[in-house]
Image (tube, rainbow, N blue to C red):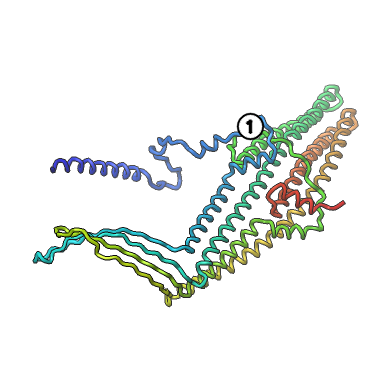
Amino acid sequence: MTKYIRSPLLTVLSGVFTQLFIVSSVFAALSAPSTSEDIWQTPKWERSNKKEDVVWKDIRARKVDAEKYLTMFDLVDIALLHSPKTRQAWETARERWANKMNVDGIWYPQATVTYGAQQTKYVQNTKLNDLNQVQFGPAGEITYLLFDFGGRDAKSRGAFYDLLQANFLFNKSVQDLLLDVANAYYNLYAAQAAVVAAKADVDNSGVGLDSANKRYAAGLVSKLDVLQAESNYFSYVYVLENAKGQVKTAKGVLAQTVGLPADAKFRISAPKKQVPTNINGEDISEMINDAMKARPDIAAARASVKSKEQSVKIADAGLLPSINFQTTTDQNGYYYYGASKAWGDDYQFVAFNVALSWDIFDGFSNFAKKRQAQASLALEKARLYQAELAAASDVWAKYFTYRASIKKLKASKAFFNSAKGSYDLALEGYSAGIKSILDLTQAESDLSDARSKLIQSERDLFSSFVQLIHAVGYLTPSDSREAVKTWQTKP
């Protein structure tokens, strides 16, 4: 018999010590960096870990139609499907929802069922008093809170307002994502337009360089004109290459915003230039009032205040007694070793009681909890005041930024038309020998600046309009359209 026990026992002990050796070896190989002056060397066992990165595999699997020109609304759909920002807020709301269901359980009776067994053995000098038995049987208990001065209701309501706050913050995350997508989309479009403008600058300076070479070959100007025109030309080539790099950067930012890898292949379509420019500035107060009703961050702050109010009520209830109903049932069976009647029922027990419980002294802990809850409520109210003041200021600033963008776009168009005419005359005059090379290069510089300002002004107008809608708190395109209809100047 001993050998049959010893063999598996040794096997088990051998396996245990082997696992302990492996674990201790791995953990012993990992320590803090030995110095602050050099990088930490990754252990060999970590470098040899070739497990697949499932997160990156999932990101890599996301594809879009590379042949289709994506509109901003297409990009919004992709972002809502893949963006981790909205998913985090969504999971937080789901967590709050589960917490509310958990808290609402206090409205129901709490039932517990157990089954136990106990062996008792007494050995005494006199055999008559020896005892060797097993007691066993089920037991059940039901407890229900009858009254606690509103504490239970406050806990349920507090969980309700916590969920409400999380839902509003989820809406805010969607709104923020829409803003991020719109800005990233138009930044990419503006970067592409900047490449087109830079190519035009290169072409214009190239024409000036050709004209300077022709006049130099004819002996009409000195070599200095050619060098100045050449210097101007290559400066625009430099700007062009930089603009191409900015396109790649802007595309990577847009890909990240919508939840795609940076090297994803996609193309965007040109935006429809229908940004309204006739919003009535006299209705700025109406916009601010709309923001107080529509902004999800303000609604979330108000829900947080409501939750803190319930915390005060919970603390108040903790200072008062609670009344509970309880019923208990128990059935006990037994088995006696060596007895003529080995099995039997010992007893059955059922009890009902109503109990009043009151912590009349707990070291003033409940008083401290109430003061803490009141202070938290006052702090949350102050944050709500701050949030509403900031929201009003945000709408005000975004509106006047939008109005300034309208005027800047008009000025940039006029600047471009003037600079284009000036360049044409300067080129014609230089070719005819009336203007100098400095006049031509200055005209090229002004035209390049005008192109840049026109692109920037178009981008700023689009961005400022989207930011205004975001500041007021409208989430969907339909909400935005209805708001704009209300704010537009009536003919």
The answer to whether residue 117 is left or right of residue 482 is left
Q: Position of residue 355 (x, y in %)?
A: 41, 73
Q: Residue beneath label 1, please?
A: 65
Three-letter amino acid code at the position of disc 1: Asp
Circle 1 Cα neighbour tier, 10 Å, few/some/many (<14 / 14–19 / ≥20): few
The residue sitting at 65% across, 63% down in the picture is 386
Vertical placement of 303 versus 425: above or below?
A: below
The answer to whether residue 12 is left or right of residue 61 is left
Q: Nearer the viewer, residue 257 or 26?
A: 257
Q: Nearer the viewer, residue 468 or 204?
A: 468
Vertical placement of 316 versus 271: above or below?
A: below
Q: Quadrant of residue 192?
A: top right
Q: Quadrant of residue 263?
A: top right
Q: Quadrant of residue 160?
A: bottom right
Q: Position of residue 161 (x, y in %)?
A: 57, 61
The residue sitting at 55% across, 34% down in the picture is 61
Q: Residue at the far left: name it.
A: 126
The residue sitting at 70% across, 38% down in the picture is 71
Q: Position of residue 314 (x, y in %)?
A: 51, 69
Tally of numbered tags: 1
The residue sitting at 38% across, 72% down in the picture is 353
Q: Position of residue 4 (x, y in %)?
A: 16, 41
